[in-house]
Image (cartoon, rainbow, N blue to C red):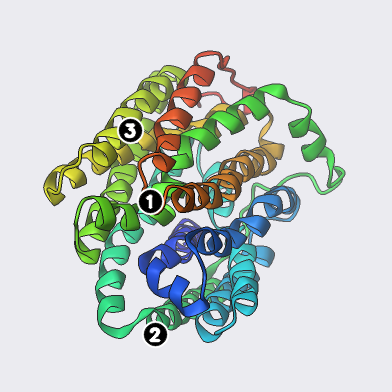
Amino acid sequence: MAFTIVSLFFLFEFVARIEPSLASDDIAIWFGLSNGGFGTLSSIFFWIYAPMQLVVGLVLDRYGPRRFVVPAILVLSLGVALFAWSNDPILAGLGRFLTGLGASFGFVSGLYVVNHWFVPSRFAVLSGAVNALGMLGTAIGAVALTSVIDHSGWRPVFFATSAAGFVLFLLAVVFLRDGQDQSDDTQSLMTPLRLVVSDKRVWWIAVLGALYYMPVNVFGGLWGKAELTADHGLTSVKAETAISMIFWGMAVGSIAAGWISDKIGHRKWIVVSNVILAALAYSAAVYSNSSSVVFISAMLFLGGLFGGAQMLTFAMAKEGHPKAVSGTVIAFVNMIGIGGALIFQPLVGTLIDMSGGAFGMALLTIPICLIISAVMAVFVSEQRHEDHLEI
């Protein structure tokens, strides 16, 4: 039940994260914003989400998930509702802020449950399964929600999403419990953080993971639909269908990479090879000038498939540290990864404005970031702590 609830929480927070991209033009017009302004409004989610990861990791390592995950789901639901209710960009920004605050517990709590409820030798594949549920739900939901938005408008859809969050909140109140395997309450709350931030290897892995995840943040999470409709002539529903292939691919790729990695006991070269292949796939989708939804969808599926190995960066980072600080390690890596959206979402929007609405130059950031990530991964040393050895 804990695994199911936290996985559904990740699904809910990811839908809330990307939801503005499903109606980017309508929302920008509603609030009177430019592309850069809309990118900034959307990225407010990450302004609180990213720094909160440090808090999330520390409190999960110390207290477990229940007392924080349950209210986080409620706050996230309220934030989505406020965004939909407002007609002022400042108030909408507050709603986006609350959405990010609640969502900050979603992904890390999922991996925390995997790490503390299941054997260490299954961490990569089960963490991939958490990611897969979020990706599959988002892939299906984004297309369905886009179709509903086209017919009913974006605000009713946002209100319905918020209502679904309240249902999940009630389920968490009833069913979510803490596990038996918790940290020692006698250790200082800040001890895990001191261990993590002093480890240069964790910093290196976190940055390469952020660059690896950049296409999901930027193309899948915000600008992809606009690029496909403007440059490839796709309708909004066809464009969102193609974008959803990223998440279908991520779902398959994260489980496959995790399973292979757990089988062979290595992460590094899986990451290196998959990053390079992801760069090729995304480049083909963006720069082919094709108007075929089948071809574009296939390339974006491959981009997501090879992007699924990004989940291995969490395993790579945590395996150098004891289990008692794993929540903080995972949260720190996630903070840097998601924090990339703070830079790249508004940056790409600004580059689009500077290019007079053209996406080509702005989206060169995708292959550049992926190639840098692959080079960085080559220099990572693989480590295993005794807490994470095969049992």
Residue 16, given in percent of the width and then of the height, sits at: 47, 66
Between 164 and 292, the residue placed more toward the observer is 292
Residue 76 image offset from top left, x and y in percent: 57, 71
Q: Nearer the viewer, residue 115 or 273?
A: 273
Can you say whether 28 is above or below 240 in the image?
below
Please tell me whether residue 173 is drawn above or below residue 3 in the rendered image: below
Q: Quadrant of residue 204?
A: top right
Within 10 Å of disc 2 (Cα), the crowding (few <14, some 14-19, many 20+) is some
Describe residue 340's horizontal placement relative to residue 311 as left or right.
right
Rendered location of residue 153, percent (x, y): 34, 82
Q: Secondary structure at mark 1?
A: helix
Per the rendering, the mark at residue 220 is 1
Helix, strand or loop for disc 2: helix
Q: Are marks 1 and 3 in contact (CB under 8 Å)?
A: no
Asked whether the residues under the numbered discs 2 and 1 touch, taking CB atoms below 8 Å apart as contact, a structural biologist would say no
Q: Residue at x 46, y 79 (%)?
A: 30
Which tag is nearer the camera, tag 2 or tag 3? 2
Question: Which comes before the other along the chain, label 2 or label 3?
Answer: 2
Foreground mark, 1 or 3? 1
* Residue 384 can be seen in this image: yes
Task: Give the number of the disc on residue 156.
Answer: 2
Packing grade of label 1 (10 A; few <14, some 14-19, many >=20) is: many
Q: Which residue is depicted at the point 33% across and 46% down?
A: 251
- The quadrant holding residue 337 is top right
- Residue 70 appears in the rendering: no
Name which residue lies at 68% across and 55% down: 64
Amino acid, disc 3: Phe
The residue to which callout 3 is attached is 306
